[in-house]
Amino acid sequence: MEKIILMLGTFDSKGNEFAYLYRELKRRGSSVLTMNTGVLGATNLFPVHIPADEVARRGGVELSELRQKGDRGAAMAVMCAGARILCQELYKEGKIHGIVSMGGGGGTSIATTAMQGLPVGFPKVCVTTLASGDTSAYVGSKDILLFPSIVDISGINRFSRLIISRAAGAICGMVATDPIVDANDQPIVMLSMFGNTTACVEECTRLLKDRGFESLVFHATGGGGRAMESLIKEGVAVAVLDITTTEWADEYCGGSLTAGPERLDGPGIAGIPHVICPGCLDMVNFGAMETVPDKFKQGDRKLSVWNPMVTLMRTNKDECAALGKILAEKANASNAPVAFILPKGGLSILDCVGERFWDPEADRALFDAIHEHANREIPIVEVDANINDPVFARRAVELLMEIYHS
């Protein structure tokens, strides 16, 4: 089957650079479909198959209107939306098998917004001046390869030729390499894990394997939670065992590892069973001690230096009660089977008898809020054990199987 690479970019301002990329893709025998996201014009250096006016129109505004207004920010938003919609349609119709782009700030934003609408595993390469520092806004929860441009993408020279040529080779190689499909692949259960719940998740993974399931484990560090939610919505999993919902503590208290307010929404949207556990909701994550907000350094707040770069703060009763209500409301909103499992012996390694975050009153406030606000038909199981005790993992897997087979 012919493999087609979509070359997307601002052909108005970087026509020469994209012309070189186009030639490099063709030199490697690739078929190329082109999409112009440049508002101010196009190019005659190579065929333009999807013009900018079509991209703008799919973004909800005519190109002539964008040009007349002259608002760069508004134009960027429209072209981002239009490019994403068109890329999703091309993928679903089987018309593209990889995507490549180049850009500075604006071009990278449009390209990666479009790429984020494509599934994990679909080849995505973007040569960019922004492939360093915090790239989370560009990568999102997808496997986008940001290829450092080294020099600005402005003209063809000995360095840009090298980088663009290598990027062309990368996307061509990715498209030409078919993933290995194993006929013995088992249905997937997704789990969330933190260092403080590792023992629990490892035991759950072992038990799930014995029952014929493959486990995908995501580190609950913000990006991990977002990636898990994204893949759930894509229909990758058959169930979710959400052992570690700590990202909600960071979302509520202003910590550094939030996964956003959509965390826990995925299973309901996908219509798959979801067991929710308040794992590590006893802690909020900050960076080094000096990054902890002053308001939390006062009074009797429990702070613990986990390592030189991470400071943990124990959630108090009020915060736990608020978090319990949030979890209950998320469960109530789901149209799929959902259940809670609560570890009465503590939410983490640090939250057990004799450890620094042991606070049964705060945990009880969290549990009581879940009981109070969750719909009556939602099962709530309390286990007299710490979250990392094997008995808790066994009961969590049993509960997931109960609602999975219900």
Image: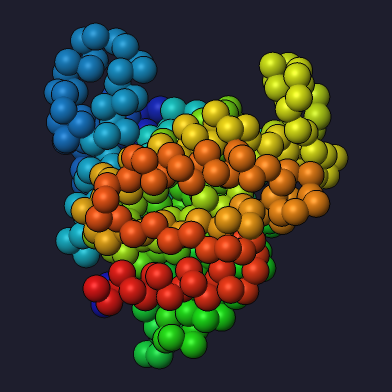
Q: Which percent across, then down, holds residue 302?
A: 75, 33
Query: Where residue 281 sits in the image (x, y, percent)?
Result: 58, 44
Q: How many marks?
A: 0
Q: Residue at x 49, y 63 (%)?
A: 191
- As drawn, the residue found furthest toward the right would be 308
Q: Is residue 56 above or below residue 265?
A: above
Residue furthest top as drawn: 69
User: In this orientation, does residue 140 appear?
Assistant: no
Q: Quadrant of the N terminus?
A: bottom left
Vertical placement of 343 versus 44: above or below?
Answer: below
Q: Residue 232 is drawn in which quadrant?
A: bottom left
Quarter of the image for the C terminus: give it.
Answer: bottom left
List the single residue furthest toward the bottom.
184
Which residue occupies the foreground of this view, 66 or 264? 264
- Residue lying at 34% horizontally and 40% vertically, measured from the top left: 373
In this image, 176 relative to 312: left or right?
Answer: left
Q: Tell me which residue sits at (61%, 64%) in the image.
A: 385
| Identity of the residue drawn at 25% across and 55% down | 377
User: From where the camera sits, is residue 318 visible?
Assistant: yes
